[in-house]
């Protein structure tokens, strides 16, 4: 990003005198010379699409991070409404070398929702130094090593589970789709974000409560092929199994309710 001609000129122009800018962008030349090289852009200031156009494979998803951090629920919904081609090229993160440790920003209470969301969306799932152990020391980029610190048991167990689940083929070769959540009994359905991963062999359904209070709604499946009479919704986060009839799924939809900052990560199969 800092090598973009306009950014470089804005940052260092006062020192460049009458020097002319290069005729091409550095990254366009680099991508042209090595078209098979995967490039990840650390990018801010709304320049994500610009970097992708110049040949980058992935760009930081700073917009989603900011919306999630700030409890900007409408912003999260709007961002996830982007095309799947764009979503696939975003690097999702809860922390990086510029952001404070996620436990400091989100805390233990928000880990189920924030961690499940960032760990199961399409694109690159980006994990930072010591994040998987719940590190609390913010390591300046100029330092090579941080002081030893005890692991956070909650974080270790959560990330071990998420990483194991998302090794499954559906999360890498399945088809991702955002799902609607309709109101059911109260106006809290807008706090929920739901999406699925479908492949020939499996069906994953993720529901995340972005708010601090309990939220509920119904996910409609009208018109969807549901050949079995009943389906098991096994939550891979806690092992609970919910059995639902296909007639109910088609007519009323799947009822979901999560406490504040909770999440479901369902493996769905015929009962």
Image: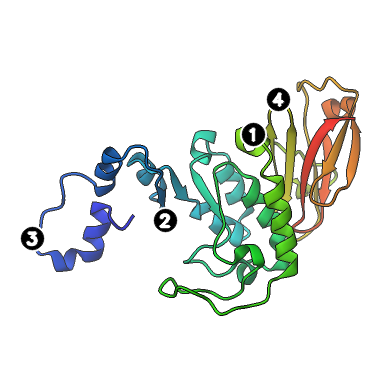
Q: Nearer the viewer, mark 2 or mark 4?
A: 4
Determine whether the residue tagged by mark 4 lies in a helix, strand or loop. loop
Judge whether residue 94 can be spotted in this image: yes
Does residue 177 lie above or below 159 as drawn?
Answer: above
Mark pair 1, 3: CA separation? 51 Å
| Residue drawn at the location 70% of the way across and 51% of the way down | 162
Q: Depth check: 205 or 192 in front?
A: 205
Mark pair 2, 3: CA separation? 29 Å
Mark pair 3, 4: CA separation? 60 Å
Side (left or right) of 253 relative to 156: right
Any mark on residue 177, and which?
1
> Which is more N-terminal, label 1 or label 4?
1
| Residue drawn at the location 90% of the way across and 33% of the way down | 244
Side (left or right) of 245 relative to 39: right
Residue matched to label 3: 18
Tags 2 and 4 in contact by the CB under 8 Å rule? no
Does residue 73 lie above or below 249 as drawn?
Answer: below
Mark pair 2, 4: CA separation? 35 Å
> Which is more N-terminal, label 4 or label 3?
3
| Residue drawn at the location 68% of the way across and 68% of the way down | 107
Residue matched to label 2: 42
Determine whether the residue tagged by mark 1 lies in a helix, strand or loop. strand
């Amino acid at each position: 990003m800092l090598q973009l001609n306009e950014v470089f000129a804005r940052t260092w122009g006062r020192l460049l005198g009458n020097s002319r800018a290069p005729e091409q962008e550095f990254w366009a030349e680099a991508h042209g010379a090595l078209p098979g090289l995967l490039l990840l852009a650390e990018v801010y200031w709304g320049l994500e699409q610009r970097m992708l156009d110049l040949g980058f494979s992935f760009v930081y998803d700073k917009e989603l991070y900011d919306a999630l951090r700030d409890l900007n629920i409408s912003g999260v919904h709007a961002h996830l409404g982007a095309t799947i081609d764009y979503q696939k090229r975003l690097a999702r993160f809860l922390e990086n070398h510029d952001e404070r440790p996620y436990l400091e920003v989100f805390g233990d209470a928000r880990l189920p929702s924030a961690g499940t969301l960032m760990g199961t969306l399409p694109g690159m799932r980006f994990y930072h130094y010591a994040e998987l152990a719940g590190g609390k020391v913010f390591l300046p980029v100029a330092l090579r090593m941080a002081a030893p610190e005890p692991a956070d048991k909650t974080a270790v167990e959560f990330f071990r589970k998420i990483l194991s689940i998302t090794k499954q083929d559906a999360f890498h070769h399945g088809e991702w789709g955002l799902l609607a959540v309709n109101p059911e009994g109260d106006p809290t359905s807008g706090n929920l974000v739901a999406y699925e991963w479908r492949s020939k062999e499996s069906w994953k359904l993720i529901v995340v409560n972005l708010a601090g209070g309990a939220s509920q709604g119904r996910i409609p499946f009208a018109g969807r092929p549901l050949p079995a009479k009943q389906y098991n919704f096994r939550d891979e986060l806690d092992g609970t199994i919910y059995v639902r009839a296909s007639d109910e799924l088609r007519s009323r939809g799947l009822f979901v309710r999560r406490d504040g900052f909770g999440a479901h990560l369902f493996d769905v199969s015929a009962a």
